[in-house]
Amino acid sequence: MSDTSEKLKLAILISGRGSNMITIHKACQDPYFPAEIALVLSHRPDAKGLTYAQEHNIPTEVVDHKEYSSRKDFENEMNSRIEPYKPDLIILAGFLRILNAPFIEKWPNRILNIHPSLLPKYKGLNTHARAIDDGQKEAGCTVHYVVPELDSGPIIVQKSVPILEDDTPNTLAQRVLEQEHIAYPEAIKLVANKLLST
Ligand code: GAR
């Protein structure tokens, strides 16, 4: 990668503590990282990650889903708050609301998600409990492009961890989260370098 001047703009969508967003923000401090955060948006006004973003002078927006009577209105409002920042990529980082086709299709190949399983295994919720209950030996995380079908878009990066005999969903989630924090910056770097070179 050539220099520090060309960077992709990220809009990061969160629902809660935002540890993936924080890790991405830390990666962006490297002058050779090919992206910068333009916006952090949450649908929950009390999302803890918003405080981190504000303390680090990252612009934030809140679109409280409870204030909208339909998904369509909620997603249209999110879109109109995101667009002025002109992001190159939308990064779902623990964004726990399902996005619908009309929103996703506005950003073709421009939305990334991190999911706490080795997709295509364990789409949806409670991934760690289901993997333990099934006697799996391995779990992990996946960064993928978002398509209208849930947790199904092309995979960009996966990281795996062992499932230990005495694991609970919480201990496993912690081990996987450490890998998420490696996987997401790695995936953004791959995608950004690809977009910058085309
Ligand atoms: C992460 O483990 C992420 O993989 C998961 O939510 C957590 C958010 O943590 N996402 C999903 O389950 C999406 N289906 P964070 O707010 O600390 O980044």
Image (cartoon, rainbow, N blue to C red):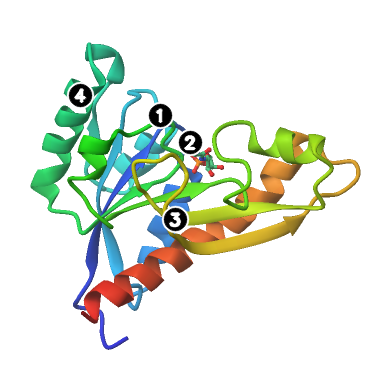
Q: What residue is shown at x 62% (from left), y 41% (from top)? A: 122
The disc at residue 72 is 4
The N terminus is located in which quarter? bottom left
Label 1 vs label 4, nearer the camera = 4
Mark 1 → mark 2, Cα distance in angstroms: 6 Å
Quadrant for residue 162, please give it: bottom right
Disc 4 is placed on an element classified as helix
Residue identifier under label 2? 17
The C terminus is located in which quarter? bottom left
Residue identifier under label 1? 47
Mark 3 → mark 1, Cα distance in angstroms: 23 Å
The disc at residue 144 is 3
Which residue occupies the extreme front position in the image? 149
**Residue 48's spot in the image, x, y percent?**
43, 32
Q: Is residue 39 left or right of residue 51?
A: left
Q: In this view, does 102 lie to the left or right of 24?
A: left
Amino acid type, label 1? Ala
Amino acid type, label 3? His
Q: Does the residue labelled 2 lie within 8 Å of ligand 1?
A: yes
Mark 4 → mark 3, Cα distance in angstroms: 24 Å
Quadrant for residue 18, please give it: top left
Q: Earlier in the sequence, mark 2 or mark 4?
A: 2
Amino acid type, label 4? Lys
Disc 2 is placed on an element classified as loop
Q: Earlier in the sequence, mark 3 or mark 1?
A: 1
Mark 2 → mark 4, Cα distance in angstroms: 26 Å
Mark 2 → mark 3, Cα distance in angstroms: 21 Å
